[in-house]
Image: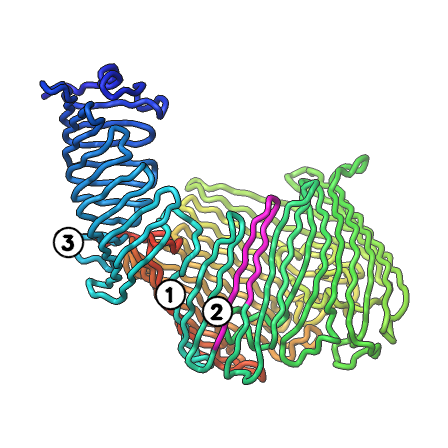
Amino acid sequence: MLRRVLILLLCSVVLGVSLGSPGMSQDRAALVADAVSVDPSGRLVASGGVEVFYQGRRLRATRIVYDRADDSLLIEGPIVLVDGTDTILIASQAELSADLNEGILTSARLVLNRELQMAATQIQRIGGRYMQLDNVVASSCKVCEGDPTPLWEIRARKVVHDQQERQIYFDQAQFRVAGLPVAWFPRLRMPDPTLKRATGVLMPSFRTTTSLGTGIKLPYFITLGPHRDLTVTPYFSTKSGRTVELRYRQAFASGTVELNGAVSRDEIVPGETRYYLTAEGEFALPRDFTLTFDGVIVSDAGYLLDYGLGDEDRLESRMDVSRTSRNEYISGRLVGIRSIREGETNSTLPTIISDFTFHRRFSGGPLGGEAGLKFQTHSHYRSSDDGSTDSDGDGISDGRDVARASLRLDWRRNWQLPMGMVGTVLGEVRADAYRISQDDTYGGGTTRLHGGLGAELRWPWQKTGASGVSHVIEPVAQFVWAPKGVESLPNEDSRLVEFDESSLFSLNRFPGSDAVERGGHLNLGVTYTRYDPAGWTLSTTLGRVFRDSDLGQFSQASGLDGQQSDWLATLQLSLPQGLSFGHRMLIDDTSSLNKAESQISLQRDRYSLTGSYVWIIADTDEDRPDPISELLLDGSYKLTDNWTAFGQTRYDFEADRANRASVGLQFRNECVSVDLSLSRRFTSSTSVTPTTDFGLAVDLVGLGSGISAGPSRACRR
């Protein structure tokens, strides 16, 4: 066998370039071959596993003949020319210039971004920028020897690839599916797979609903420079639906902005123009602050649901400026709310809200431990001028406007005690100043001073068995004292109280600032955790709150009403096979279940399942006249490497009907992605009716869709 020869000096003389190894400067060239010789006519002949490295290109061939007279290369294949990271040329033979920028390759194939392949009788390289292909078949589908027909292909008389602009131009193009012609284009232009943004038509999608009929969306993408773009999507449906959707995006040096909107005319609301507009953005500000904003306006209550744009029934527009550091959080926000919920009136809702928060954590100084200081302001405005209370039975006047300033100081310190016990002393004090207007009961200025002091004792026990199983039991007792007589204020931000393992040991369980937990109470609980070396973990918590007196602060559904709270019981199980289960419930002394939540999740390679069940009793204090009993299931199953099925349902047991159900099927391989979906919304109101929605979206990989390729199909032997 001939020995591999690395020719450096000889190529320098013959090719007239500076030579070096492949790892050196790209302006140098290197030739590696089994044998190199000079024939009687003075031509350089390299044969046997030839490789040439030059200016980032790599050429592999069986034999190369260099003719110095016309500065050309005669190459015998099989030939593989790798030009950069995104372009590969494969041919049986070629005649190229010495710098590989000019010439012809016969029986050739061009591969772009390892996705789109174009086979041609010959490929002509022109000036290092253009490649002209004759009698072309283009596809990103894998072609098997026993089944040479790809799933889709484009046949053209001629194709020109502009490597600089990264555009592909087809002449006399015919689009085929499974070998059958379905469309013909005299001229066709598309971006190559390496170009992320280019003006042109995107893949259409189909949607069928009972209210709009069958429709098609035809998106057109427009680049407005390197930092801006616009997508215009006409949407036509059979039931006289005419819609134009718009999306505008712009990137700045410090942030981004995106606008989405649509204008429609349809038979659902005859004779009226329907529309929506959303805006969102994020910007970096000086001193590490961040500005974020999002807003939405919509013409009517049913528009978002009718067009599959969301199911929000309280539209929130907001602007936030915030900064988060290790020990400090600063935030200011302005929020506008518009309700499209049936039965609600915007004039009696707090439609304009402003907040400011400064929160700082620091050392407790001579007291030790850790302390925190929080300053907060809040205000909300209602457009109604009615100051009467309980006009709708919720304890809130129709026109009440509130402004509040709050200051809170908290402190906590732990001590290690004998026998492994941990003692803690904690406390907080807060001051609130309110200004309330348009309220016959609470109108005027009011101040409130409140605090709490607590002592806590934890005694963790741990045992590890010979098998490696570890058991941890931790009983906790916490006593909290707080004054009973506190200024009564309207409660608008603390009406929904969650009693769970995270709030079992708290000085104040109200989530907002309007209400505070009063009186002395004893929080008792015990947690057991088992760690198994096999990879599974079990954890459970049991707890209860005892009060010195019942002050009527909490609703029945919260589980905290009365002198003794409901029993809180939780269970968490995590298995190594991807299965996890969680359950939380509140049970009173009569063994009645007031609130329960169960969750299960199973994640495997081929399938996944997530389910949850919620039960909550009716409670008018929480604006819930009827109990809640709902089941939510969401799952997927990978039928094959290419096919995946999805499903979701939400069932209301109290109403004895499903609120929503959907199924979907997705196919994805190396060249195409197909998504089919079918959903049904069963609930109805005066603004929306039950509808069925069918969607179909097809994307071709390698034609600028931005869809990543799926698993390639396997060829039969």
Secondary structure of residue under mark 3? loop
- Kindly identify the residue that appears in the image at 52 percent across and 73 percent down: 630
Neighbours of disc 1 within 10 Å: few (<14), some (14-19), many (20+): some
Q: In the rendered view of the protein, which quadrant contains the N terminus?
A: top left
- Look at mark 3 in the image and give the residue it sits on: 716
The residue tagged 1 is 697
Q: Main secondary structure of the magenta part?
A: strand
Circle 3: residue type: Arg
| Circle 2 residues within 10 Å: few <14, some 14–19, many ≥20 | some
Q: Are marks 1 and 2 in contact (CB under 8 Å)?
A: no
Per the model, the C-alpha gap separating discs 1 and 3 is 29 Å
Left or right: where 553 falls relative to 567: right
Q: Residue at x 56, y 49 (%)?
A: 251
Q: Nearer the viewer, residue 447 or 32?
A: 32
Labelled disc at residue 632: 2
* x and y, in percent, of residue 487 in the image: 87, 64
Q: For the view shown, which residue lies furthest in the front direction? A: 69
Q: Residue at x 46, y 53 (%)?
A: 574
Q: Secondary structure at mark 2?
A: strand
Please state which amino acid type lies under the numbered disc 1.
Ala
Q: Earlier in the sequence, mark 2 or mark 3?
A: 2
Q: Is residue 327 above or below residue 447?
A: above
> What's the residue type where badge 2 is placed?
Leu
Image spot of residue 44 (x, y percent) = 16, 21
Question: Residue 431: x and y, percent?
Answer: 85, 55
Secondary structure of the residue carrying tag 1 is strand
Q: Residue at x 57, y 60 (%)?
A: 259
Q: Is residue 421 left or right of residue 389?
A: left
Q: Nearer the viewer, mark 1 or mark 3?
A: 1
**Residue 622 vertical placement versus 3 (above, below):** below
Which portion, as a residue range, is magenta? 242-261
